[in-house]
Image (cartoon, rainbow, N blue to C red):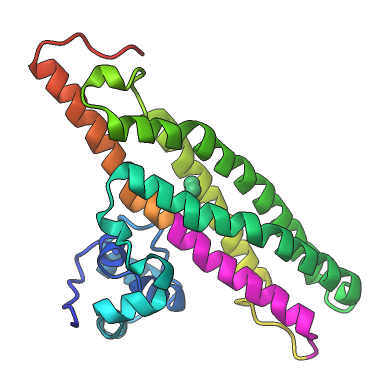
Amino acid sequence: MTLTIDPDSTLGTLVNEVPARAGVFEEYGIDFCCGGSRTLRAASEAAGVSLPAVVQALEEAGSVGAGAAAEPQVAQSGWAAMEIGALAGHIIDVHHTYLKRAFPRIAELADKVVNAHGENHPEVLEVRSVFTHLREELEEHLQREERALFPWIQQLAAAVTVEDIGVAGVEGPISCMYSEHDDAAVALGTLRSLTRDFSPPADACPTFIAFYGALREMEADIHLHIHKENNLLFGKVLAREQRLVDAAEAAGTPSLQT
Ligand SMILES: [Fe+2]
Ligand SMILES: [Fe+2]
């Protein structure tokens, strides 16, 4: 079933409704993850693209069937409707696992391409350097989420009263995650620009083509990963914490430890 697109919907909402729309935003160079709170109208204007053309592409992608085809591994599990504990687990299973597998493979491809083509295509040295820095930053970021924030989210998901949370104030750690996501998005933009939209040169060998293809795939996965955290998980987490705090205050219970 095709859905009508409201240009004043936020990008985050549009992708949550139909995951296949992420592919349209990728195609038009519209940032839907860190910039997911913008309306489609504002984001199209900022990206310098035709709003009617984007709306048409979104409507064409906007069926339940199209979403399932674009992201078969998660379509059936319906991540947009998941509660916070399940969603945090889903993000680790799908996106953290993907990155842990992709990073060593891309690093190996980068080394091969630099060794074979660095002389004729010196830009690949910078591509490798930006990728290596992004990898280091994201590996630490994934650890922070898996060791601290996400276990706390699981605790929050299971909490019945505010006392079950233990420590209040998840806003600080979440704002730190937002900031690290912004840094990752900037690095991805640099990779896209250095590689001319991940287009290998005319004399590229299969390894070179595989390297840029892997970077493109990594970019799309990180965008969707950040979208799920920024525009879905974190908002639900903050709302749930607030509901528990409000319920405790209404009942006259002492506030959380800080
Ligand atoms: Fe994550
Ligand atoms: Fe994250």
- Toward the left, the furthest residue is 250
Indicate whether 109 appears above or below 255. Answer: below
Is residue 28 placed above or below 46 in the rendered structure? below
User: Could you say where residue 49 lies in the image, as x and y percent from the top left?
Assistant: 37, 78
Compared across the picture, whether 8 is left or right of 200 comes to left
Q: Position of residue 213 (x, y in %)?
A: 64, 77
- Tell whether position 207 is magenta: yes
Indicate whether residue 216 is drawn in magenta: yes
Q: Which residues are magenta?
A: 203-225
Q: Is residue 183 visible?
A: yes
Name above or below for residue 122 compared with residue 126: below
Quadrant of the rendered structure where residue 44 is? bottom left
Residue for point 62% across, 63% down: 190
Magenta stretch prevailing secondary structure: helix
Confirm whether residue 62 shows in the render. no
| Residue 14 percent across, percent down from the top left | 26, 66
> Going 23% across and 35% down the picture, which residue do you hit?
240
Q: Nearer the viewer, residue 2 or 134?
A: 2
